[in-house]
Image: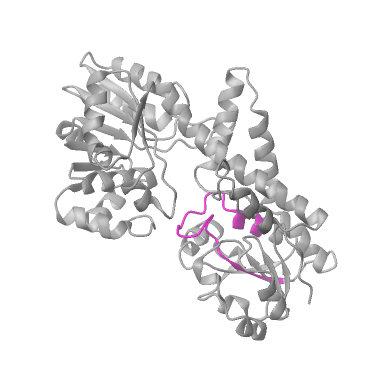
Amino acid sequence: MNITIVGTGYVGLVTGTTLAELGNSVYCVDIDEKKVEGMKNGVVPIYEPNLEEMFLRNIQSERLFFTTHLKEALDKSEVIYLALPTPPGEDGSADLSYVLKVANDIGEMMTEYKVIVNKSTVPVGTADRVREAISSKTDIPFDVVSNPEFLREGFAVEDSMNPSRVVVGASSERAKDIMSKIYQPFTNTGIPIIFMDEKSSELTKYASNSFLAVKITFMNEIANYCEKVGADVDKVRLGMGSDDRIGHRFLFPGIGYGGSCFPKDVKALIKSGKQENFNFQILEATENVNTNQKVILVSEIEKYFGGNITGKKIAMWGLAFKANTDDIREASSLDNIALLLQKGAEIIAYDSIAESNVQKLLGDQIQYAKGMYDALEDVDALFIATEWPEFKNPNFELMAKKMKNKVIFDGRNMYPLEVPEQNGFYYKSIGRKTISK
């Protein structure tokens, strides 16, 4: 089947590459000429493990194409996926201007039946708005479908090729039949395709992400309480997660959630609720707790240094919002950097994947190290902000030689407590006892 993907951001590029891998001819459209030219030459514009191999394979197999011309791609395809940004507005609501502009363009350009697929995360009722925008420009028949993505950054290729389910919101039998054919390679292997109405599909995405944000935040609250009463959150987590009604995933405490999805989607669902005179009280509490949780270790750093960190040199391991991605959107590292700088500290950071994105944002406000141990040279403390695998088993002897003080503030609970203790480090993590030297 011939398919067009409008937008080559994270969702669009992974979706387009996956659909090409499934044997379709896929035309990816983006207005950024430099980006499109780079992709034509095999340059993957995002970091995602294992994506480049699949991307190059499908370019070489002539199933994956790139263009800046919507009309050109539209004329070749029966199915048009909209994978456009829906950033939060000032009031937290999702900005649909990109989606609705392209919908208008499609209405003006289409010459035969098309299925328009909303792949972006959009508020309930967006399918209706897209339908209205297109129908205001044309009398040619078309259908609008909601097909949210459930990709985890860092595992997107795995998730795209082995999804737990495919959710499709469609009221047209013709559109359902076409979507069934696209996803037949999945359903043939037992992966379910769940059909529902468009509004339920749109809400499924928001509800899923918001629930996971709540789960993370609840565990962070439990971790903070553990510190008050002397319990160990790792043991509590294992005990809870062994209940199959709860499960082990998303129970790891830390310095809050970030990224492109959870913060944005929680805000958008809160705002959507208010538009219907409905208050998502649990989501409002989740958002407030997460804001505080992201910088919860800064007060611990101040406490350790007697209330004043002016001039203190802090190494930061990790800048991405999570491991295996270069995404720094809503990253906890940025919140901590801002607050530490405000309080007079100096920051030297290391993250080989996300560093360039932070440099574009912060410039020379902080220093950047070439290696994880280089960042430790003569520092007063180490702050771990991202759970990159390379940080999991460091050389503590080398760390001790390089650091002025053997002090670690760990926002991701990277080490069993006995490891820093045996190596003579002061070690403060989340929801566990503090190891004093």
Total number of numbered discs in the rendering: 0
Does residue 183 belong to the magenta stretch? no
Q: Who is closer to the viewer here, 431 or 352?
A: 431
Q: Relative to residue 131, is residue 373 depicted above or below?
A: below
Relative to 130, say whether 60 is above or below: below
Q: Quadrant of the N terminus?
A: top left
Q: Left or right: where does residue 76 sit relative to residue 406?
A: left
Query: Residue 121's spot in the image, x, y percent?
Result: 44, 34
Position above or below: 263 against 300: above
| Relative horizontal placement of residue 342, taking residue 113 as reference (left or right) | right
Q: What span is in magenta?
A: 313-337
Observer able to see residue 233: yes
Left or right, residue 81 beside residue 78: right
Picture quadrant of residue 234: bottom right
Q: Farthest residue in the right direction?
A: 306
Quadrant of res 417:
bottom right
User: Looking at the image, which is closer to me, 11 or 73?
Assistant: 11
Can see residue 66? no
Colour theme: one colour
- The residue drawn where x is 42% and y is 41% is 150
Give the quarter of the figure containing the C terminus. bottom right
Residue 161 coordinates in the image, percent (x, y): 31, 48
In-image side of 355 versus 17 (left or right): right
* Of residues 186 and 267, the one drawn nearer to the viewer in this rendering: 186
Residue at position x 60%, y 54% in the image: 252
Magenta-colored stretch includes residue 326: yes
Residue 262 horizontal/vertical position (percent): 54, 42
Q: Measuring 58% from the left and 20% from the top, which residue is drawn there?
A: 275
Residue 402: where, in percent of width, then height?
A: 64, 83
Q: Which of the 4 quarters of the picture holds residue 213?
A: top right
